[in-house]
Amino acid sequence: MSPVAASAHSGADAHLHDTDAALQADPCDVDALLRRGRALHKDERFDEALVAYQQAAGCAPGEPEVDLGLGVVHEAAGDPARAIPYLDRFIDREGAHAGALLVRARASEALGALDDAVRDLKAASALMPRPIPDHVLKLATLLARTGHPDEARSVLDAALDRLGPIKSLQRLRATLPEEAP
């Protein structure tokens, strides 16, 4: 293990030690289970993260943060089909949430549901105070792939106007056909 990986791993282990102590005192400490799930997810220990979130679900059925955690981890672990129902339930209960919408967009794209991914990317972008270039690039790319080059161009132009010249956005903009007269 590299020194950087060992350092990151020991940081996660230290955080897990704290949650273990809380869970020994109360095995249904939902906050500790959520912290544990987040730490394990960050450490890419997806199976263990899922166990923590599932334990939290058993202790607090219907807790929105549990659904969000399960959706995020399933998507990160490469199981988008299992991620979407949890993310749907979280968004249905909590309303529009940029992070959940972005994860659901990735899951939808992975499943080939490109129109759903576009819808979620648009909704997430509307919640952000400032465009994020990677999100703009993804949205414009999906719009172009789904037969909406005019809208892709519009999204890119609006982002470039707000953010200034960003090479990745400019490159994609240059590849899109100009609007027919």
Image (cartoon, helix red, strand yellow):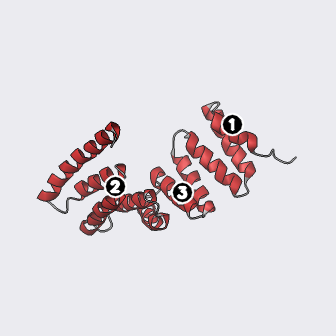
Residue 77, percent from left and from top: 43, 59
Query: Alpha-carbon neighbours of circle 1 within 10 Å: few (<14), some, or many (≥20)?
Result: some
The kind of residue tagged 1 is: Gln
Q: Which residue is mark 3?
A: 105
Q: Which residue is mark 2?
A: 45
Residue 64, percent from left and from top: 36, 61
The kind of residue tagged 3 is: Ala
View extreme (left): residue: 25
Count of numbered tags: 3
Q: Secondary structure at mark 3?
A: helix
Q: Which badge, 1 or 2, is on the more N-terminal residue? A: 2
Q: Which badge, 2 or 3, is on the more N-terminal residue? A: 2
Query: In the rendered image, which quarter contains the N terminus?
Result: top left
Residue 20, percent from left and from top: 18, 54
Q: Secondary structure at mark 1?
A: helix
In the drawing, does residue 151 fall left or right of residue 61? Answer: right
Q: How far apart are the alpha carbons under marks 3 and 1?
A: 23 Å
Residue 170, label in figure: 1
The kind of residue tagged 2 is: Arg
